[in-house]
Image (cartoon, helix red, strand yellow):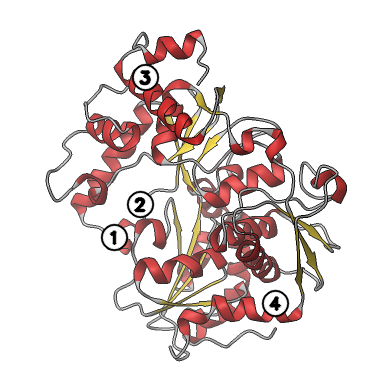
Amino acid sequence: MRLTDTDRAMLDGAHGPAVGRAMDLLVRYGQALGAEQLVDTNNVCGANIFGARHLNYPARTITSHDEAFSELSLDSDEVVEVPQVRAYSCQLIGPMDSRHWELQGLSRQARDAIADSESYSGRHGIHLLSTCTPYQVGNVPVRGEHCAWMESSAVVYINSVLGARSNVEGRESTGAAMLTRRIPYWGLHDPGNRFATDLVDVRVEAESVLDWGLLGYFVGSVVQDRIPALRGITTTPDLVRLKHFGAAASSSGGVELYHIPGVTAEARTEEEAFGGAEPRRVFGYGPRERRETYEALNSTAAGAGDDIDLVMIGCPHATMEQVRQVCTLLEGRRVADGTHLWVFTPSQIRALADRNGFTERLAAAGAALMSDTCPAIGQFLPDGTRVIATDSAKQVHYLPAIMGVQGRFGSVETCVEAAVTGRWPGEAL
């Protein structure tokens, strides 16, 4: 790799051992990728909150936060003293809701360990946004800005909708970028790699959030890790629809960037999306594909019966409008005995929900408004949960595998109805 004089100084330890370890990791990482150089970044979103699951290994126990950061975020077998981060850095979604940790089933010891880790990150300059949607709560990168973000649903959003540039990074590369403000220049950092490869011809109207989740899941399943452009979109989707579309596409496939001509940041026309080239592959999405995608998303619940134990809303984390929508759907009703309704949102949005009375309205209906985590990341469910329902294609894709449950997918209206009745009413497609 071609390193600048500043890169070499960091690598040689001129800025301290932790920065030296971070630069060593980035050089090795970049060489493995075939990157020829590093690029500046001042927008890093990673995951550096550690709980008991991270700190207790079969062979030994990690005893300090510097040791945890050294090993788990810098790939260093030497414990180094971690300085203040140099880049603007944000903590992504974590393992705990500080308000509802008991509802999560955490012990006091586990709660204290996570809170201590959060304090360590905060003291080192990492902003505790603790959400999978930093772009909803203040971190909104601009077109062309080089970022180093984890979280597939966030990366596909900022790449596509905002036109920022990031690959889906990991804990180690983001930890190193926080200390160096550098990341390998490869993949989607290079504008030549950002043109569409595949065309998806959408032959049914995509209107509801459900529609966009289904469409995203289909797109990811057929294009995998390539770059799709959509044809046939006749309306302008809002943040929520694009959020669900990207999350679904990055779950069924590895989509990190898509183009919707006239909507997303880098494609005013289909020709512009493809850079003047022809699509390598063309896929059609019509009523049959829509139905088959819905059936695939509900396949883990085959034979599960109609009873629902948990309804989960807010993956990716819900907007204020989504929280309000659930409140409206619950008006004058209560969650059924034996069923739970959990809504997840960033803590900053929950603070607004508190002020607007939404948190109290949800609690009065027997629901809980939670933040900073989700069942897949925190790995928690109500005791005895066998079947969950969600409006998120991403959550129903991952949670059955992670937690050994069966999952149903539908609209938020259908999910709230399931929470109130305790039974899955089905979706009229």
**Which residue is more in the foreground, 265 or 189?**
189
For the point 47% across and 87% down, which residue is it?
Answer: 302
Q: Residue furthest left?
A: 59
Q: Can residue 83 be seen in the rendering of this structure?
A: no
Q: Image quadrant for the C terminus? A: bottom right
Q: Can residue 79 be seen in the rendering of this structure?
A: yes
Q: Nearer the viewer, mark 2 or mark 1?
A: 2
**Mark closest to the chain's N terminus, 3 or 2:** 3
Identity of the amino acid at label 2?
Pro
Q: Is residue 388 left or right of residue 146?
A: left
Do labels 3 and 4 touch, CB within 8 Å? no
For the point 37% across and 23% down, which residue is it?
Answer: 24
Q: Nearer the viewer, mark 3 or mark 4?
A: 4
Q: Nearer the viewer, mark 3 or mark 1?
A: 3
In the rendered view, would you say 336 is above or below 138? below
Disc 2 versus disc 1: distance between alpha carbons? Answer: 13 Å
Q: Image quadrant of residue 158? A: top right
Residue on which the image places disc 3: 19
**Mark closest to the chain's N terminus, 2 or 1:** 2
Q: Nearer the viewer, mark 2 or mark 4?
A: 4
In the rendered view, would you say 164 is above or below 18? below
Disc 3 versus disc 1: distance between alpha carbons? Answer: 38 Å
Disc 2 versus disc 4: distance between alpha carbons? Answer: 36 Å
Instruction: Please provide percent x and percent y for residue 150.
Output: 49, 43
Q: Which numbered dot is residue 95?
A: 2
Q: Which numbered dot is residue 289?
A: 4
Instruction: Please provide percent x and percent y for residue 61.
Output: 14, 43
Residue on which the image places disc 1: 102
**Mark closest to the chain's N terminus, 2 or 4:** 2
Instruction: Please provide percent x and percent y for residue 409.
Output: 55, 76
Do labels 1 and 4 touch, CB within 8 Å? no
